[in-house]
Image: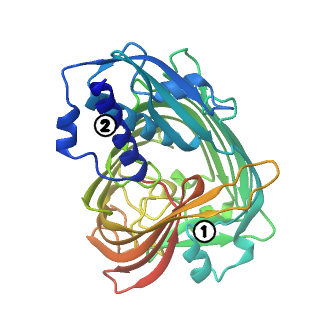
Amino acid sequence: MLQKWKLGLFCLSAILCASCGLAQPAADTMNAVRSTALYTVSEIFITGNIKTRKAIIERELPFAPGDMYSPEELAAKLGTARRQLMNTALFHHVFVAVKDFEDNRVTIQVDVKERWYIFPAPYFKPADRNLNQWLVEQKADLNRINYGAKLLYNNATGRNDKFRLWLINGYTKQVSLSYDRLYIDKKLKWGAAMGFAWGKNRELNYSTVSDKQVFLKDPDNYVRHFINGHFSFSYRPAINNRHTFGVGFSSEQVNDTIVALNPVYFKQGRNRTGYPFLYYTMNWFNLDYIPYPTKGYAAQVSLSKNGFNHSINLWQLHLKALANWQLASKTYMHINVYGGLKLPFKQPYFNRRFLGYGDTYMQGYEYNVIDGMAGGYCKTTISRQLLQFRIRMPKGKTREMMAVPFRIFGKIYGNAGYVYNPEPGNNELSNQMLYSGGLGIDIITLYDVVIRLDWSFNQLGQNGLFLHRKTIF
């Protein structure tokens, strides 16, 4: 009876520490319950899953009926189970605990509270690379706004799959849809995904001068048409890693004015290109909270091949890594590393984009793009949690009272990077070391929304306040 009480006390303390982000139980507490006795998991009870299939939850658990653990091993497994289930982005809250003891057999309770999964919403977003570029360089031009409607349907069949439909007008006219991830085996290790997009633009970035994009706009005609599609298989042999193998086709056409302004936009003065592509991606995560990790590691390796003839021939290798450590109570260090290589080095203009596009950028250079064929960066950040609170929303007739969580971190950071460009043209930021730094605030709230407010400085003497919302990479 005493051993059961010790096991229960230790497991409860581990669960509370994992839920609140506190340190693990002290060593003397662990020694007090450490025993040669092993406990067998007899049953697992899952409650709260209205839409999510039971098998999807069981897939994330690091234990199964019949497994045997010491008290400290079992407590660690309970914490891992909660972290893995929260990282699926399916649930608001997860509670995992020992429910009952009988001799050396334990039953485990997994209780979840599901999120809202359907988001039909209006779409309104500047077409520029970031909000600062639209506000400052484009003078908040409303003609550069994309608007329309989008449908996000997460956990569509209860198998943690995602359906996306976008109907976009304005700067870009686009229709796109995608579905990810159809599981095709009973063990939920193999999945499939597919996507399709069609669109056209009246304006196009056709060159880079002084490390800034140069655009051509035609108010009467579309200067770019595109269509692409892909199909992929994913393989998840273990909880923390996933391999994706994909194939697709992309086609683009620009008007003759683009070719006249930049004859190497496509290869050999062409105004259109179409090519198949293949890609492989490996993702590995061991993080406490994927949208904003404070502990753990992650890595991503991506290899792709675009085209198989003289008009399009491009190999790409991209490596990303993330490491996070706790330095003191509520204080953390983060290191984010990226490296990329494109071969062969001689490529048309639309294949030379490197830093400043999408989420691959250096803080402090948000107004610039840096074209090239090889390079990377290292970002180092020290953050400290300043506030953590919840705002309770009024209770409706058909729903429970909901509390919107907020966590606010202060941070300081520094970046260093380099991009090699064999044909820099009238651009100066490539082929030299780049440095930047700054301080900022990160806000984490409901549905994994992370807002980053940065005050950045770079080696050119430029500074500014920048707003970002991005993933860990």
Q: Amino acid at mark 2?
A: Phe
Give the number of callouts.
Answer: 2
Rendering coords of residue 280 (x, y %):
43, 33
Q: Is residue 340 above or below residue 195?
A: below
Q: Residue furthest bottom?
A: 461
Where does label 1 land, which residue?
128
Q: Quadrant of the N terminus?
A: top left
Q: Is residue 413 above or below residue 245?
A: below
Few, some or many residues within 10 Å of mark 1 (<14, 14–19, 20+):
some
**Marking on residue 10:** 2
Which element is circle 1 on? loop
Q: Residue at x 67, y 80 (%)?
A: 140
Distance of mark 2 from mark 1, alpha carbons? Answer: 52 Å
Which element is circle 2 on? helix
Q: Earlier in the sequence, mark 2 or mark 1?
A: 2
The answer to whether residue 343 shows anywhere in this view is no
Horizontal side, residue 172 vs residue 65: left or right: right
Q: Quadrant of residue 394?
A: bottom right
The answer to whether residue 215 shows anywhere in this view is yes
Rendering coords of residue 398 (x, y %):
81, 48
Q: Residue at x 69, y 43 (%)?
A: 117
Rendering coords of residue 368 (x, y %):
45, 73
Horizontal side, residue 131 vs residue 101: left or right: right
